[in-house]
């Protein structure tokens, strides 16, 4: 069976769809297994898939139908036009978070040196994307998940980023005596109830600790704003990703901590997702 035949057959007979987003997923799968660039699939569409790869493709599709996230199956994910390696022990970056990266890049001047902290950096998607686009700035990524930091370091080497470093640290015992121009974070913000409800209807494969926060999902956000504002330089700003119904309470937490110019803006789906505040 050729690549072209495989794509056509599995789109209609396995996924029962011809929607472009599912075709895209199939292309990601086959490019990953055959180790070819997705953009070269059309050129190589008549290439014959050997038995070993055919079995592997079938196995991946089986687990995809079971609900396993595609990045876990192909061992990488695209974020801000960069490819990041990962495994099933880490949080998967979302495309909505690219809006946060856009905001920071557009707000800063790329020829100025900024010191930026990324709390809960995961596999380094935000930190590395910023480092790539703000080459004179210095970015520090922090995460308590040792596996995440391992992949963050792997990704920074693969993507040849020199102005970023990562620390395996829990923000609840962070004590570095240094101040930053910008602090950004995509912390856990799902409540225990939300997690259990979603997981009951559709199994969640990502690490629970990367998703769930106490006190209806706002404990980590409260802690970050309350503690880390002392690590922020005067006139520096903090940018937090949060649940689409949490904008009001996040603004209140910022106000309580004497931040100014507080503003909430939307993600790609027009939901309140990020709140900015200046010290």
Image (cartoon, helix red, strand yellow):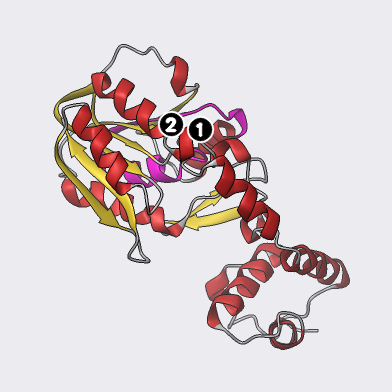
The residue depicted at 75 percent of the width and 87 percent of the height is: 9
**Camera-side mark, 2 or 1:** 1
**Label 2, label 1: how far apart the Cα atoms are:** 8 Å
In-image side of 104 versus 35 (left or right) = left
| Residue at image mark 1 | 214
**Residue 33 vertical placement versus 84 (above, below):** below
In-image side of 64 versus 23 (left or right) = right
The residue depicted at 83 percent of the width and 73 percent of the height is: 50
Along the viewing direction, whichever of 201 and 169 lies nearer the viewer: 201
* Mark 2 surroundings: few (<14), some (14-19) or many (≥20) residues within 10 A: some
> What element does badge 1 sit on?
helix
In-image side of 5 versus 161 (left or right) = right
- Inspect the magenta stretch and tell me whether residue 62 lies in it: no
**Residue 33 vertical placement versus 10 (above, below):** above
x and y percentages locating residue 192 in the rendered image: 57, 41
| Residue at image mark 2 | 220
Q: Which residues are magenta?
A: 122-147
Q: Is residue 184 visible?
A: yes
The answer to the question of whether label 2 and label 1 lie on touching residues, with beta carbons closer than 8 A, is yes
| Quadrant of the drawing holding the N terminus | bottom right
> What element does badge 2 sit on?
helix
x and y percentages locating residue 145 in the rendered image: 58, 30
Along the viewing direction, whichever of 44 and 181 lies nearer the viewer: 181
- Inspect the magenta stretch and tell me whether residue 142 lies in it: yes
């Amino acid at each position: 069976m050729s690549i072209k035949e495989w794509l056509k057959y599995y789109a209609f007979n396995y996924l029962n769809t011809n929607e472009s987003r599912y075709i895209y997923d199939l292309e990601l799968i086959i490019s990953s297994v055959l180790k070819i660039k997705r953009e070269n699939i059309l050129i190589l569409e008549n290439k014959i898939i050997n038995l070993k790869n055919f079995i592997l493709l079938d196995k991946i599709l089986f687990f995809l139908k079971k609900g396993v996230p595609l990045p876990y199956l192909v061992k990488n994910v695209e974020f801000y036009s960069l490819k990041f390696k990962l495994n099933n022990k880490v949080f998967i970056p979302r495309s909505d978070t690219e809006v946060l990266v856009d905001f920071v890049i557009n707000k800063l001047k790329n020829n100025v040196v900024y010191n930026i902290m990324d709390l809960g950096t995961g596999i380094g998607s935000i930190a590395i994307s910023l480092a790539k686009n703000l080459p004179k700035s210095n970015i520090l990524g922090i995460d308590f998940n040792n596996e995440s930091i391992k992949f963050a370091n792997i990704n920074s080497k693969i993507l040849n980023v020199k102005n970023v470093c990562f620390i395996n640290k829990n923000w609840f015992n962070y004590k570095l005596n240094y101040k930053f121009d910008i602090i950004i974070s995509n912390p856990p913000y799902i409540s225990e109830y939300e997690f259990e409800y979603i997981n009951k209807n559709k199994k969640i494969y990502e690490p629970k600790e990367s998703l769930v926060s106490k006190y209806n999902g706002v404990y980590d956000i409260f802690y970050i704003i309350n503690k880390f504002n002392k690590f922020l330089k005067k006139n520096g700003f903090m940018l937090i990703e949060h649940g689409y119904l949490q904008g009001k309470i996040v603004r209140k937490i910022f106000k309580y901590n004497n931040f100014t110019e507080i503003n909430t803006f939307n993600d790609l789906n027009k939901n309140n997702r990020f709140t900015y505040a200046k010290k």
